[in-house]
Amino acid sequence: MKKITNIPFLDIDSIPLLIKDFLTQKVPGFDAKVFTYENMEQQIGLKSKSFPKEQRETLCKVLEKQYSAFKLSDKQQENLALLGEENTFTVTTGHQLNLFTGPAFFVYKILQTIKLAEVLKGKFPDAHFVPLFWMASEDHDFEEINHFKTTENYYETKGKSGGAVGQIKVEDTFFISQFEEEFKDSVFGTELILLLKKAYKIGNTLTQATQIIVQELFSDFGLLVLDGDDVELKSAMKPVFKEDLVNQTLSKKSEDLVSLLSEKYGKVQVNPREINLFYLSETRDRIAFEDGRYHIVDRKQSFSEEEILNELENHPERFSPNALLRPVYQETVLPNLAYIGGNAEIMYWLELKDYFDEINLPFPILIPRNSMLMLREKTLNKIEKFDLEISDFFKNFATVMKGLLLEGNEILPYLNKQEEVLKKHFTELKEQASLTEKTFGNLVGAEETRQLKSFDRMKKRLLRAERIKQSEKMERLEKIFSTVHPGNIWQERIYNFSVFYADLGRDWLYNCYEEIEVEKSELIIFTI
């Protein structure tokens, strides 16, 4: 496995404009929240002053409890001990509890988080930095996380939907026998099969399964995993949850920023609700305020204000933040400096800055995670035969294909030349027409439009004719594109990590880790 190149996000057409503007400090108010070492030093100061000692003690206590069934690596033990010290901070990423981690970027974002913690230690030796993975165990969309895909198969498990997915117990293990059939002859296939069987043992919850997998893959790196579905952690959120219930503060305070982002960049990633909380019972249901009462949507249950505040005071574990309130939860209970996330995550975090300011909670440094692409040598050879670069596959590919089709074509330059001659003639004619009656000038303008449209039609016909003539070439090119972009999206969002781990084992993890450059947001491309 070898890195062959990297492409900065700024050079990739499909990266959202908001992310590019954020990275180049063109989004007003966020200059101090883009990753630089100067900004990180400032963030250390902000968090040092705002993170209470009692919250640090609670965090350590909860982590020790959640790790009670695991054997910690030396690095994990060290990091857990360091968390008790006031000069220790976390860098965090998070994800859903996808079956067997889901798409490969699950691994990439964790590796970048670990690497950032290591780099920061070198830059700021007077402080300590712990990489932390936040499990989204309270999400309730089971269909979104109950599957993963390899190059050969689609794997899925069954389970009862509607409640917090972390509490769902494993009952169906048919996918494991399917997986075993695909990977039994791979170099590291047995290791993967045993991990799958250990994690998804009948009776394990999806939270336990994810803890087991992440522990097996990343414990030697010192990564700590936190499950936010915890009564002691949620107790710290009572004031914030109360504000959201009674005053709808998040919705009101983020309104101006959401409007600004919508106006310039289109529809925002997640729209704030009046109330951004769910109620957890055997299901996870949205809370809505209507006719003077708090209703649990889709359930025949409602509370008066006094009743729901009593419920919050006595049972904070029954209240679950939505996607927009969850960042607030994370930053409240963690001594956190930076959050590493995908583009969609970063975009909805950006909506929250004014609200963070309102509640005097330091807004973290935001880092769009690196992406990775694994390609076979033969795929690169095919790309080179077309005189293309791998970067061409991350541009507007229709334009790239059009260029290839018409390369060396003699008719197109002739058409372009005649079109320019036509434009010149009509410019001269319009100058003369302006000296006579208005309707004649309109006629000249209409005739110019008609004739220029004819040139457009001829070019489109020419492209279609070349596509038919060079159909075999186009078919080969489209197959390469499908290899680079399986399912027409980025590889890391389709294939599970097992596709690469099966042949390369832990060396694959370490190679990915070594090539990550935390100062940059980029696509890193490897041959395997």
Image (tube, rainbow, N blue to C red):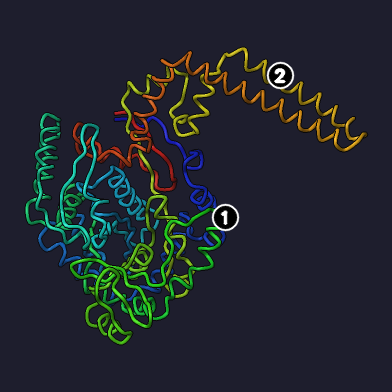
Image coordinates of residue 126 in percent, x first then y, are 36, 62
Front residue of this view, candidates 224 and 213:
213
The local crowd at label 2, few if under 14, some if 14 to 19, many if 20 or more residues have their Cα within 10 Å, is: few
Residue highlighted by disc 2: 417
**Callout 2: SS:** helix
Residue 469 in view, yes or no: yes
Image coordinates of residue 366 in percent, x first then y, are 43, 57
Instruction: Name above or below for residue 398 compared with residue 509.
Output: above
In the picture, measured across the screen, residue 234 lies left or right of residue 435, that is: left
Residue 57 in view, yes or no: no
In the picture, measured across the screen, residue 480 lies left or right of residue 506, that is: right
**Callout 1: SS:** helix
The local crowd at label 1, few if under 14, some if 14 to 19, many if 20 or more residues have their Cα within 10 Å, is: few
Task: Name the kind of residue labelled 2 in the image.
Answer: Lys
Q: Residue most toward the front? A: 439
Instruction: Name above or below for residue 187 compared with residue 169.
Output: above
Disc 2 to disc 1, C-alpha distance: 38 Å
